[in-house]
Image (spheres, grey):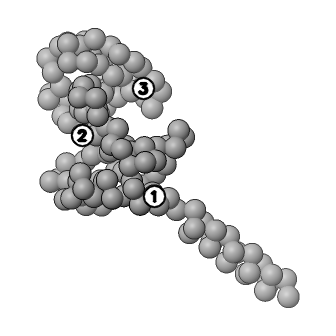
Amino acid sequence: MKKLIFLFVLGLGASAMACAQKTPPKAVSDAFTQKFSKAEELKWSQEKNGDWEAEFEQDEVELSANFNIAGQWIETETEIKVADLPAAVRTALQGKKVKEAAKIMRADGTTVYEAEVKGKDMLFDDSGKLLSEEKD
């Protein structure tokens, strides 16, 4: 009897975990599909603020895109080589070991650059000005 109860509880836990997987609202998934029709290896997660993040590949490039709950696109982050950062950003990072770099295009039309240095994400504008720094 104890084995039966244990198996039931174990199965119930596995079912709960399967249901806990994140699936965005239809407005978000529709907006994503419209903007990124060639996306492959899609993985969704929900941010603490309620926005949705899609991590995916497109044309052999790693990207992530954020959408609010209504399906409005917020930004797209594209992985780039450190050498592809603007010269002013590379100069600002001189002497630092950059683990990863990205170009972030925002819905307001601005573009910023991200560099991961010692477990922190540093955001720069294209003139090399440090905009923010936060723990990864």
Residue type at numbered disc 1? Pro
Q: Is residue 14 left or right of residue 55?
A: right
x and y percentages locating residue 117 in the rendered image: 36, 24
Proximity of marks 1 and 3: CB atoms separated by less than 8 Å: no
Which residue is the site of mark 3?
A: 120
Q: What residue is shown at x 46% (from left), y 51% (from top)?
A: 45
Q: In this view, does 20 lie to the left or right of 3?
A: left
- Distance from disc 2 to disc 3, alpha carbons, whole Å, reads 17 Å
Q: In this view, does 125 lie to the left or right of 55?
A: left
Camera-side residue of 81 and 35: 35
Vertical arrangement, residue 121 with respect to residue 45, above or below: above
The image quarter in which residue 59 lies: bottom left
Residue type at numbered disc 2? Thr
The quarter in which the N terminus is drawn is bottom right
Numbered disc 1: secondary structure? loop
Which residue is the site of mark 2?
A: 78
The image quarter in which residue 27 lies: bottom left
Of the two numbered discs 1 and 3 on the same chain, state the one appearing first in sequence: 1
